[in-house]
Amino acid sequence: MSQCCACRYPAPPLPVLLGLTIFSILLSVSPVIGWRPWPHQQINATDLEFGSSKKYEGSSEFVHLKYHMGPVLTANITVHTIWYGTWQKSQKRIIRGFLNSISNVNTKTPSVSGWWKTVQLYTDQTGANITRTVHVGAEKNDRFYSHGKSLTRLSIQSVIKSAATATTHPLPINPQSGLYLLLTSDDVHVQDFCGQVCGFHYFTFPSIVGYTLPYAWVGNSATQCPGICAYPFAVPVYMPGLKPLKSPNGDVGVEGMISVIAHEIAELATNPLVNAWYAGQDPSFPTEIADLCEGIYGTGGGGSYMGQVLDDHDGATYNMIGNGRRFLVQWVWNPVLNYCSGPNALDQ
Ligand SMILES: *[C@@H]1O[C@H](CO)[C@@H](O)[C@H](O)[C@H]1NC(C)=O
Ligand SMILES: *[C@@H]1O[C@H](CO)[C@@H](O)[C@H](O)[C@H]1NC(C)=O
Ligand SMILES: *[C@@H]1O[C@H](CO)[C@@H](O)[C@H](O)[C@H]1NC(C)=O
């Protein structure tokens, strides 16, 4: 989701495991099918079953994803990470492991690089595809909370400015191929975090930062709302009876972030200045390629059903592999097939 978060769209208001017919009627009212257990959706545990199956994965009929002629990230992407607040080495390793695996094609399938292949299907007006190469770039630690423990959408830009203008080891300024990823630790409050968003992307304003840089923010929800932003590795308190799934890397908050980071990077690549690939009439409320598939991790996914994923011998749930780790990452909208797709699809 971008600055003007797509989660404000009314989500389907009824219990979500409905027949396709009823669901289609809802979709004609609101084309947004992304799903997370936001409290206002008032879904109860009876409605939620991880195990049921049906062919869904979004609806092509009501989704009008359009290209609006703006640039996309066709040059090799370098992700510059800002670690804001208190981060454990083990947490950084999980996130770096994911970022490093996006372009690593020498991995077992279903792979993270296979997931990125769907993002590569998007082109700009010259017909150039999104790059296949995502490098991990410079990192900056902001250990002492330079802008406090409560950030707004605007002060996030000041954090990026501080990192890019630091006297020692500033982050490189690279508007063409740099992508700036601000990650906040679990004790940092961010405007709209947990209530409306788990992360967002936008670009910095020259008046604040001096440059127009595509960036994303993602927060660690472990202490604030794991049942929402780290779902399904944690479940909301208002869904008693629903058991969380076991995360593959042993850190619920961080593993919830992985799918949100993937979501934001896929959208930054295809809509970096919020004038390229999105659905919906209003450019200030764009519905982007990952918004359309939020909550969908496998074949049959849709509504509150995550789709068919993999369960390992240790009981952990995942749907792709990268650099020797297992990850659970949502699918993204496939512009060729006109539905959500991912590397663990059973029918491809
Ligand atoms: C939960 O949903 C089920 C099925 O939609 C319904 O039968 C049940 O009454 C609901 N329970 C509560 C507590 O709302
Ligand atoms: C580039 O995009 C076009 C259009 O979606 C697609 O047919 C082609 O396979 C893409 N190329 C790569 C390398 O992904
Ligand atoms: C982009 O990355 C590829 C590796 O995937 C590399 O071969 C190529 O030289 C890079 N291009 C630029 C302009 O850095």
Image (cartoon, helix red, strand yellow):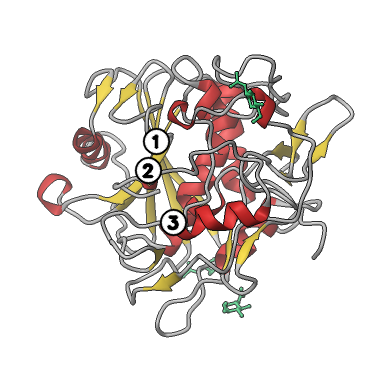
Q: Amino acid at mark 1?
A: Val
> From this viewpoint, is residue 50 visible?
yes
Per the image, label 1 sits on a secondary structure element best described as loop
Q: Which residue is mark 2?
A: 200
CB under 8 Å between discs 2 and 1: yes
Q: Left or right: where does residue 225 sit relative to residue 132? A: left
Per the image, label 3 sits on a secondary structure element best described as helix
- The nearer-to-camera label among 2 and 3 is 3
Quarter holding residue 279: bottom left
The circle drawn on residue 197 is 1
Q: Amino acid at mark 2?
A: Phe
Q: Residue at x 56, y 71 (%)?
A: 335
> From this viewpoint, is residue 216 visible?
no
Q: Residue at x 53, y 51 (%)?
A: 33
Q: Label 1: few (<14), some or many (≥20) within 10 Å?
A: many
Q: Position of residue 247 (x, y in %)?
A: 70, 26
Distance CA(mark 2)–CA(mark 1):
7 Å
The circle drawn on residue 29 is 3
Q: Nearer the viewer, residue 137 or 66?
A: 66
Lower sequence index among marks 2 and 3? 3
Q: Nearer the viewer, residue 148 or 146?
A: 148
Distance CA(mark 3)–CA(mark 1):
22 Å
